Image (tube, rainbow, N blue to C red):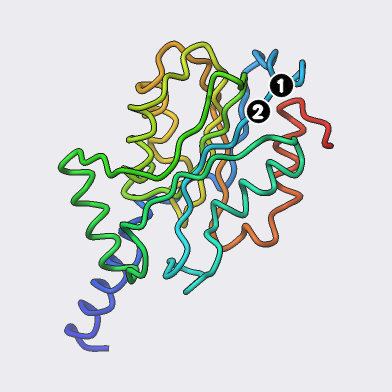
């Protein structure tokens, strides 16, 4: 392989992994906190998530986003309600332009609008999930963080990714909600979610859920 070919291959790899946000991390991380009162007492739970269908790294063009599948596993096992953070801003975008847009939004601190609303006062436990774009959640999720006060609640972050693990998501949720009980969370590779139901349920059992 000549020098030009090597450089081209390296550039392609860099672009393809950009939205993943960095080096490989542990595939799944489970909370180690002992403060599980809300789960043990079957506190009412809500799964808040953003999920991107369409062109995704490693899985191609998908009709259902990776994070949506994990959110459905959580709801099916725990009985939690769902609120999906929906925006049409990213619809139909190819992977590379989406990565570029996500990076620009993060650099500019943009807060894209989303559709709908939810009454968070009814819930004791909030699962917060999304893909990892440039090391953290997509910016539209920060719009949710700014709009809703989750102080005093137990928050459980989860992510789908292709190498970033939880990234900075737990740290960013703690900064958004300093008065909440933020757990360490869970992460799973996007290309594994369709066969990852048992892995998600194992994590939920460690949190104190026994299944419906």
Q: Is residue 121 positioned above or below 4 on the image?
A: above
Q: Can you tell which quarter of the image residue 108 is in? A: top left
Q: Residue at x 44, y 11 (%)?
A: 179
Q: Secondary structure at mark 1?
A: helix
Q: Can you tell which quarter of the image residue 158 is in? A: top right
The residue closer to the viewer here, 11 or 179, is 179
Indicate which disc residue 22 carries.
none
Q: Is residue 83 positioned above or below 22 on the image?
A: above
Tell me if I can see residue 22 in this picture: no
Labelled pair 2, 1 in contact (Cβ < 8 Å)? yes
Label 2: how many residues lie within 10 Å, few (<14), some (14-19) or many (20+)?
Answer: many
The residue closer to the viewer here, 37 or 113, is 113
Indicate which disc residue 39 carries.
1
Left or right: 133 as drawn, with respect to 38: left
Q: Residue at x 61, y 23 (%)?
A: 125
Q: Is residue 13 positioned above or below 66 on the image?
A: below
The residue pinned by badge 2 equals: 45
The residue closer to the viewer here, 84 or 96, is 84
């Amino acid at each position: 392989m000549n020098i030009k070919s090597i450089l081209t291959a390296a550039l392609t790899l860099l672009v393809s992994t950009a939205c993943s946000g960095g080096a490989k991390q542990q595939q799944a991380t489970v909370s180690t906190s002992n403060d599980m009162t809300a789960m043990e007492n079957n506190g009412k739970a809500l799964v808040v998530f953003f999920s991107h269908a369409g062109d995704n790294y490693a899985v191609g063009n998908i009709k259902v986003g990776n994070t949506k599948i994990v959110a459905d596993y959580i709801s099916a096992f725990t009985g939690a309600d769902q609120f999906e953070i929906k925006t049409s801003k990213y619809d139909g975008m190819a992977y590379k332009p989406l990565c570029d847009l996500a990076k620009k939004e993060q650099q500019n601190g943009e807060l894209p609008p989303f559709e709908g609303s939810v009454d968070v006062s009814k819930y004791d436990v909030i699962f917060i999930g999304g893909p990892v774009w440039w090391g953290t959640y997509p910016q539209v999720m920060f719009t949710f963080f700014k709009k809703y006060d989750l102080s005093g609640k137990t928050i459980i972050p989860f992510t789908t990714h292709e190498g970033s693990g939880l990234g900075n998501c737990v740290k960013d949720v703690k900064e958004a909600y300093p008065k909440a009980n933020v757990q360490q969370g869970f992460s799973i590779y996007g290309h594994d979610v369709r066969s990852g139901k048992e892995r998600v349920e194992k994590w939920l059992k460690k949190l104190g859920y026994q299944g419906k």
